[in-house]
Image (tube, rainbow, N blue to C red):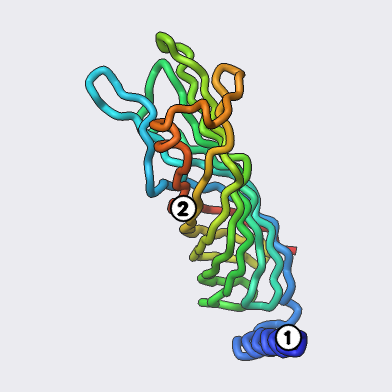
Amino acid sequence: MIRKIFFCLVFISAFGRFQSNAQGIDPGDVGKIRAEFRLCIGGGFETHPIFETTDGTMINISAGGGLGAGVNIGYRLFDAVELSSEFLYQMSVLDQPVSNATTTFRRFVITPTAKYLFFLKKDKSRLSINAGGGWGIYPSAKLDIDASNLPNGSHDIYEYNNGSGPHGCIEFEFCTRKKISFLGGIKFYHVTYKLESIKSDGITYPLNYIPQVILKEYGKIDGSGLDLYAGISFLF
């Protein structure tokens, strides 16, 4: 087994060097560190009803998509291969605004990713299309429903176990001569959250006290979605 791993590493190293030589890339450009600030916006594939208006309109929320901000840290293992990890805080809101209540679904997003860089231009500046994927972790997910301003309303917080699942991305990147990079891309991810506890007006209730109709709708929710993102990176 150790011998197989060793030969695998040798092959990867040789392949990376071959790609660098084939593209005429300066070997000194290998192994750059990326520090990126990133913003994203997206939508989830599944919605859940939260409120119903007096005219019968359902107000929903999705556990996927929403607005997010954070950083991405990367390391160029070879010239055309980068390992990186995204650290975001992301929040979804209701699909229609209401005046007397608020609801959010918040979570952290940690997505380690291996990317391959397809160079369109490579000299003192660089153009590339980057494609990759990995396995993400989504901790501290909370569905926060504040209906305390409604008659007989309450402030309920649904806390979920850490989710995890695969993701993939494709992005377009332009790197300047000053080693500042601008990029934009699209990311698909699949994740499911399982309910851990419910707190209503500051009191935590065991799940066996919760009506089955609520557990059926919110006990296990799909947080999969599709995000568009843009970022600015500094390369060291």
Residue plotted at (26% across, 17% down): 54
Question: Which corner quadrant of the image does residue 57 belong to?
Answer: top left
Which dot, 2 or 1, sits closer to the camera?
Answer: 1
Residue nearest the viewer, comparing 102 with 185: 102
Q: Is residue 17 visible?
A: no
The kind of residue on which mark 2 rests is Leu
Residue in the picture at 52% in, 23% down: 156
Q: Secondary structure at mark 2?
A: strand
Single out the residue that lies furthest toward the top. 151
Image height of 233 relative to 98, above or below: below
- Farthest residue, direction front: 208
Q: Residue furthest left?
A: 55
Q: Which mark is residue 1?
A: 1
How many tags in the picture?
Answer: 2
Dividing the image into 4 quarters, which one contains the N terminus?
Answer: bottom right
Instruction: Tell me where residue 180 appears, x and y as whole percent.
Output: 65, 60
Identity of the residue drawn at 34% across and 29% down: 59
State the SS at label 1.
loop
Q: Is residue 68 left or right of residue 225?
A: right
Residue 105 % position (x, y) = 51, 36
Between 166 and 31, the one lying in front of the other is 166
Name the amino acid type tagged 1. Answer: Met
The answer to whether residue 214 is above or below residue 82 is above
Answer few, some or many: residues within 10 Å of disc 1's Cα (few below 14, many 20 plus, some between 14 and 19). Answer: few
For disc 2, the marked residue is 228
